[in-house]
Amino acid sequence: MNDQVDQLGSLLPAIRTRPPGRRSRALTARLRAVESRNVTYSDKSWPVFWDAARGANVLDADGNIFVDLTSAFGVALLGHAHPVVVSAVSHQAGKLMHGMGDVHPSLPRLALMERLCAFAPWGDTRAVLASTGSEAVEIALKTAQMATGRPGVLAFEGAYHGLTLGALAATERQLFRAPFEDRIYDGVAFAPFPDFLGEGSDASDRALDAVRAALAGGAPNGDPIGAVIIEPVQGRAGVRLAPHGFMAALSRVVAESDAVLIADEIFTGMGRCGARFASERVGLAPDVICVGKALGGGMPVSACLASAAVMDTWPASEGEAIHTSTFLGHPVACAAALAVLDTLEQEAVTERARVLGSRILMALRAQVSEVPGVIDVRGLGLLIGIEFAESGRAVRLAESALREGLLVLPAGDRGHVLELAPPVELTEAQTDFAVETLVRLIREGR
């Protein structure tokens, strides 16, 4: 097994036993005995247990080798176990494993915040570090309320911002909301997201009219709206892109209202979409940006970034921070994030994401756009979606791809979009194999 791990990175799939194999099935049975049944879905064809990962390869507990087109929810943009990140984590873990949050800062925490503030699009930037994307969103929503004095929020249909209660209030899908409606803040309005397949400028105009109406009239509970939060590309909703010009127009409308515009770049930021932030590519001009996932290169770290004018509306600490956490600025996670930022610059990651993403997108469009049942093939950088007419088609396709040695995920509220978010480490041979396999499966109607 160690020899297999050493070879991982640029290998093509090698399936020894039909996944999930005997060991994965046994481990799943053990997991069911100890984990809430809400968490890990399992049936006869899902899941496989991961044992090791490197580059674009994942090795499962049964010795099967996969090519990962998910980057593990977008985290491994640089590839799994990138050597620069691994080295930084190992060094920092042996020096200072844990700091003391908002009381006694660590050197990596300061270094990361300085780098993130220089990375942000504003000249004078402030940051708050966190551990998860949901927490970064919570901080952003609190920041908007601090800056405007208005608690209401405007989000968009299809939005996914996380599942903690504050972030859940701005997450639209009823599957996540319904069990907790009595606990969710009811001061969130939802405007239409003008899907690229909609009616072009008409769809944008209707969405902007809904935004203006909400900003003028307030949230459903009557609270005035101080925060507008949007994903530059809606990821979990099915890689949805708005028509050209919409994001720029939205930015102007929000600025005129004196509300705070929040870009949720947890999935799309840090180079995945071919720029530092996807906002740059779609014309969004946010006041606050949330980053996470790829930021840590596999370690849990996120951040809320804002211009100093917005962030400095928080009161100065007088000994007790009113938003903090035990693992704020965790030294090992900060060291990993610093290594990620170094790698983004030194390995031209954003350009690689743009070029590789365009190559995959064009190849898929050329070969499956006319296949019956395929509605659209779209994407931005290394975030690509294939939309099907049939509900659940992407779920079945993900299961078929697993048996071929490809890891992909379904998206959309009907499981009708196949989402691809591969690492930039994907080799030419792996790319060709992935495209050829997906094309064949789609044409076969899997």
Image (cartoon, grey):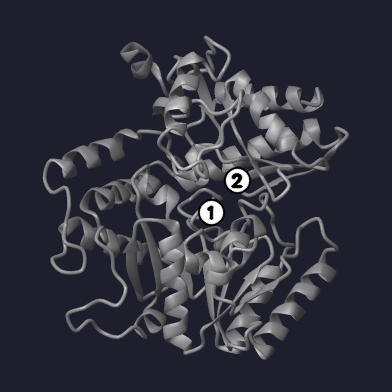
Q: Distance between the residues labelled 2 and 1?
A: 8 Å
**Quarter containing the C terminus:** top right
**Quarter containing the N terminus:** top left
| Along the viewing direction, whichever of 344 and 229 lies nearer the viewer | 229
Left or right of residue 82, residue 240 in this image: right
Residue 64: image x %, image y %? 49, 16
Amino acid type, mark 1: Thr
Residue 439 quadrant: top right
| Along the viewing direction, whichever of 428 and 149 lies nearer the viewer | 149
- How many circles with numbers are drawn on the protein? 2
Q: Which residue is drawn at 19% across and 84% down?
A: 318
Q: How crowded is mark 2: few (under 14 residues within 10 Å), some or many (20 or more)?
A: many
Judging from the image, what secondary structure is the residue with disc 2 in?
A: loop
Q: Which of marks 2 and 1 is nearer the N terminus?
A: 1
Q: Is residue 15 above or below residue 283?
A: above
Query: Label 2, on which residue?
Result: 383
Left or right of residue 152, residue 239 in this image: right
Query: Label 1, on which residue?
Result: 268
Residue 84: image x %, image y %? 29, 38
Left or right of residue 241, residue 46 in this image: left
| Along the viewing direction, whichever of 55 and 155 lies nearer the viewer | 155
Dot 2 and dot 1 residues touching (CB under 8 Å): yes
Q: Which residue is drawn at 71% across and 31% down?
A: 396
Judging from the image, what secondary structure is the residue with disc 1 in?
A: loop
Question: Farthest residue in the top direction?
Answer: 16
Left or right of residue 386, residue 90 in this image: left
Q: Which residue is drawn at 13% across and 40% down?
A: 94
* Residue 50 seen anywhere in this rendered image of the structure: yes
Q: Which residue is drawn at 66% across and 53% down?
A: 237
| Along the viewing direction, whichever of 226 and 184 lies nearer the viewer | 184
